[in-house]
Structure formats: C-alpha cells, structure tokens
Amino acid sequence: MIVGIICFMIAIIAFVIAILQFAEKGFLFHNAYLWASKKERERMDKSPYYKQSGVVFSLIGIIFLLNGVEALFQRSWLFPIVIAVEIGTVIYAIVSSVIMKKKK
C-alpha cells in the first residue's frame, strides 16, 4: 500500500511539472538547456524544449500512475502496459531530440 501511495505522489508531481512545462513556466528540464552556456540560453527558442519536456513528464506521470494502480490493486496484467509506456517514452525522447537537432 505504501508503494502505491508513493507512486501516486510521484505521478502527481510529474503531472504538475508537465503542466508547468506545457505552460512554458518554471525551470526548463531539458539537457539542451542545462548544458547551454548563459549566452546560448538567452538566445535559444525554448518552446520546443518545453513541449518535449512536458510530453516526457506526462508519460512519466502515466507510468507512475499505472505502477500505483498495480501496487494498490495487485493487477499484474498492468505490467506489460507499464513496460510499453516506458519503452514509448524512451523512444519518443530519442526520436524527438534527433528531429529537433536536425531542424537546427
């Protein structure tokens, strides 16, 4: 039960961060921004980075939400769905980063 509650709390945090990222408010959680110099940060268009971070945090929220449901209700059939969403999240992050890099 404790694991389920912790998963739900992490899911809520991830969804809040996702909402802030989609609204382009708050800290930008993106490697391109984190590794950029101060000058580059001032010049860069942050909009696509906020969108990508918002999608990724939404998917992370879904992962933890499903894990919480699985832990609380002991539904083992959710495990393959969680794995599929995790794989999809990684694929999305990689593919969208490559596409954004090519657009530059």
Image (tube, grey):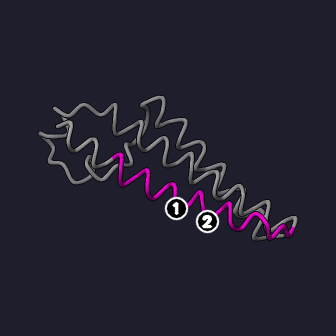
Residue drawn at x 56%, y 45% as measured from the top left: 58
- Across and down, in percent, residue 74 comes to 85, 70
- In the picture, measured across the screen, residue 35 lies left or right of residue 16, that is left
Crowding at mark 1 (Cα within 10 Å: few <14, some 14-19, many 20+): few
- For residue 91, above or below residue 100: below
- Across and down, in percent, residue 77 comes to 79, 66
Which quadrant would the N terminus be assigned to in this image?
bottom right
Q: Point out the residue furthest to the right here.
A: 73
Q: Nearer the viewer, residue 27 or 69?
A: 69
Q: Point out the residue furthest to the left here.
A: 39
Q: Which residues are magenta?
A: 74-96
Q: Is residue 5 magenta?
A: no
Residue drawn at x 21%, y 36% as measured from the top left: 103
- For residue 46, above or below residue 57: above
Q: Which mark is residue 87?
A: 1
Q: Which residue is mark 2?
A: 83
Residue drawn at x 46%, y 37% as measured from the top left: 21
Tag 1's secondary structure? helix
User: How many numbered discs, if any?
Assistant: 2
Predominant secondary structure in magenta?
helix
- For residue 13, above or below residue 54: below
Q: Nearer the viewer, residue 53 or 78?
A: 78
- In the picture, measured across the screen, residue 95 lies left or right of residue 72, that is left
Residue drawn at x 45%, y 59% as measured from the top left: 90
Crowding at mark 2 (Cα within 10 Å: few <14, some 14-19, many 20+): few
CB atoms of marks 2 and 1 within 8 Å: yes
- Across and down, in percent, residue 35 comes to 22, 54
Q: Quadrant of residue 47?
A: top left
Three-letter code for the amino acid on which mark 2 is drawn: Ile
